[in-house]
Image (cartoon, coloured by chain):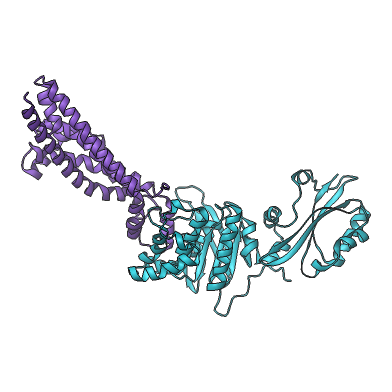
């Protein structure tokens, strides 16, 4: 393949991947984070005790997470069509990616929030804080480094998931690799795709780590 | 000097905190037996004083202090803080109460993501105070606790003592009328403990703030608490003026807690060899406590004169409880009937407080 053609294919595929990952990441996190906060604070004797709802939400989250992504993509096609009016293309691919992101973020956020020392919650209660003040001023503030790493991990996983949405014509880097590199026996395309993916994932991880380190005031920085 | 178990007299406006038959049970649902953490506690905490509650781990002291600001609710009985019954308050009422009751913790419980300054500001933010007012309130507090140059530091950059100073400043931010201290010095080394206790004492004196502290360390109570209550298995077993309770402990919990902290200490090898009843040829080991008028008598000379030249001094110390001096002496003498009788009548004459530690060769 001519280098300029390869470059143009790669560029288009990269933009599609970034588009899918960004939109699914943002929407999925906006929905997943509150669910994670709920899961972390609604157990028996916690800030918003609702143990039954907590168990139900937890079960739904587990069910979604245990469904293999490629099956999820196919299974929710009717829903995807309802939302986007079509079941193929990049926009259609964003729907299953978002659905998969929500429980992923929820669980990671839950565990990041549960890492916060219970003593801080008690101290805040002793100051007369409302449960919502505790969530925003204590839990989210203290879990910020953990949440940042959770969102980083989410984006990296999304890059991997997005390779599978070629199955519904979603495009992106994974799709390019499969169609050109594998089905048309063009190893140079496959190689180029892998290199771009590695660079993309590295970039996400490195910036996530840097951000998390900046938020983390627990380590002495002398 | 009164050794009654009566509660200290309340001021004209009543006690700051009163526990009335307060009981707290945990669990007891789903057929499990309930655990009784507090069992009918009656106790008053006088205004303006430092009151210490001491007990071993699991005695119920953490639960007791948490009843005061409603972090735990009594299963039965009442807890009254400055005339308000805590159990009757709703969520809003509880939040108002908590803004008038500061609390400090064993592990400081500071937000690692906030600087010292912002940690102290947190209760004020929670109370909805504006930025400017917060700054005006926090700055003098930083100075009060002696952290003037550390305001911009994060907790991870500070020592344990400095962290507790932030904790204290934070607890004082809302200008409370009562300060609760939950094992505030238990995670600190002895020297830092003393400096934190001094700070608490100064605050009590300068701001007239009532302090209620719980601890398992006799040293803490001895150093700053003018009133003490000893708690064991969920019950208050002894309480009164610290000096009275500590110089004449009645309950065995008090005695054993005191044995490690106060006055003359015996070497471990003597202690472990002691028997509760004398065998022929054994010697009696007795602890004498002298304070008030007895502190000024030439005791040792009279001891030898009255009991016999055989009296041996094993250990002795002059100590201070809540600012009052007292001495203690561990002596041994032959445990034969005549000597024991001479000693008994001598102790009675001089009204010395004595405690037979045991008998040994």
Residue ID at (58%, 77%): B11
Which is more toward the observer, B200 or A157?
A: B200
Horizontal relation, residue A170 to residue B124: left or right = left
Query: Number of marks in the image?
Result: 0
Q: Position of residue B32 (x, y in %)?
A: 49, 47
Horizontal relation, residue B54 to residue A85: left or right = right
Shade representing chain B:
cyan
Horizontal relation, residue B53 to residue B91: left or right = right
* Quarter of the figure with residue B289: bottom right
Q: Position of residue A21 (x, y in %)?
A: 18, 40
Q: Position of residue B105 (x, y in %)?
A: 50, 57
Which is more toward the observer, A167 or A67?
A: A167
Shade representing chain A:
purple
* Quarter of the figure with residue B213: bottom right
Q: Is residue A71 above or below residue B143?
A: above
Residue ID at (66%, 70%): B6
* Quarter of the figure with residue A102: top left
Which is more toward the observer, B247 or B322?
A: B322
Which quadrant, please, contains the N terminus of chain A? top left
Q: Residue furthest toward the bottom?
A: B12
Q: Is residue B96 above or below residue A112?
A: below
Q: Is residue B308 above or below residue A87?
A: below
Q: Is residue A47 visible?
A: yes
Residue ID at (36%, 55%): A138
Q: Is residue A128 visible?
A: no
Q: Position of residue A16 (x, y in %)?
A: 11, 37
């Amino acid at each position: 393949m001519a280098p300029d053609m390869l470059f143009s294919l790669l560029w288009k595929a990269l933009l599609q991947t970034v588009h899918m990952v960004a939109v699914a990441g943002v929407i999925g996190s906006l929905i997943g984070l509150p669910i994670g906060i709920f899961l972390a604070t609604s157990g028996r004797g916690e800030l918003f005790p609702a143990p039954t709802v907590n168990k139900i939400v937890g079960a739904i989250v587990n069910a979604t997470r245990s469904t293999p992504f490629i099956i999820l993509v196919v299974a929710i096609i009717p829903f995807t069509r309802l939302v986007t009016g079509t079941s193929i293309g990049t926009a259609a691919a964003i729907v299953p990616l978002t659905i998969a992101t929500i429980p992923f973020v929820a669980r990671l956020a839950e565990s990041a929030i549960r890492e916060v020392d219970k003593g801080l919650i008690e101290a805040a209660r002793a100051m007369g804080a409302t449960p919502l003040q505790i969530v925003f001023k204590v839990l989210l503030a203290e879990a910020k480094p953990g949440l940042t790493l959770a969102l980083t991990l989410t984006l990296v996983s999304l890059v991997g998931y997005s390779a599978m949405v070629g199955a519904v014509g979603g495009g992106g880097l994974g799709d390019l690799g499969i169609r050109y590199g594998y089905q048309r026996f063009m190893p140079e395309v496959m190689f180029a795709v892998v290199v771009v993916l590695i660079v993309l994932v590295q970039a996400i991880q490195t910036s996530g780590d840097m951000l998390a380190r900046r938020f983390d005031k627990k380590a002495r920085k002398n | 000097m009164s050794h009654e178990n009566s509660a200290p007299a309340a001021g004209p406006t009543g006690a700051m905190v009163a526990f009335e038959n307060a009981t707290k049970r945990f669990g007891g649902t789903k057929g499990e037996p309930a655990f009784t953490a507090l069992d009918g506690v009656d106790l008053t905490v006088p205004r303006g004083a430092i009151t210490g509650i001491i007990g071993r781990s699991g005695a119920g002291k953490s639960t007791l202090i948490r009843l005061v600001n409603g972090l735990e609710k009594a299963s039965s009985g009442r807890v009254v803080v400055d005339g308000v019954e805590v159990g009757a308050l709703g969520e809003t009422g509880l939040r108002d109460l908590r803004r008038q009751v500061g609390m400090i913790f064993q592990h400081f419980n500071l937000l690692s993501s906030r600087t010292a300054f912002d940690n102290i500001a947190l209760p004020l933010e929670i109370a909805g105070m504006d930025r400017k007012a917060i700054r005006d309130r926090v700055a003098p507090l930083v100075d009060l606790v002696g952290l003037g140059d550390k305001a911009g530091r994060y907790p991870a950059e500070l020592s344990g003592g400095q962290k507790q100073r932030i904790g204290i400043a934070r607890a004082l931010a809302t200008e409370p009328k009562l300060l609760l201290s939950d094992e505030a010095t238990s995670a600190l080394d002895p020297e830092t403990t003393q400096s934190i206790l001094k700070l608490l004492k100064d605050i009590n004196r300068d701001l007239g703030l009532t302090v209620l502290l719980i601890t398992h360390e006799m040293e803490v109570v001895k150093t700053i608490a003018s009133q003490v209550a000893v708690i064991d298995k969920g019950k208050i077993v002894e309480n009164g003026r610290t000096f009275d309770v500590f110089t004449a402990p009645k309950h065995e919990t008090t005695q054993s807690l005191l044995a490690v902290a106060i006055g003359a200490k015996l070497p471990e090898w003597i202690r472990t060899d002691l028997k509760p009843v004398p065998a022929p040829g054994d010697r009696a080991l007795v602890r004498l406590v002298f304070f008030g008028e007895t502190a000024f008598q030439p005791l040792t000379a009279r001891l030898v004169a009255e009991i016999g030249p055989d009296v041996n001094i094993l250990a002795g110390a002059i100590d201070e409880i809540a600012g009052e001096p007292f001495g203690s002496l561990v002596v041994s003498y032959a445990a034969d009937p005549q000597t024991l009788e001479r000693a008994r009548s001598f102790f009675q004459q001089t009204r010395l407080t004595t405690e037979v530690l045991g008998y040994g060769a």
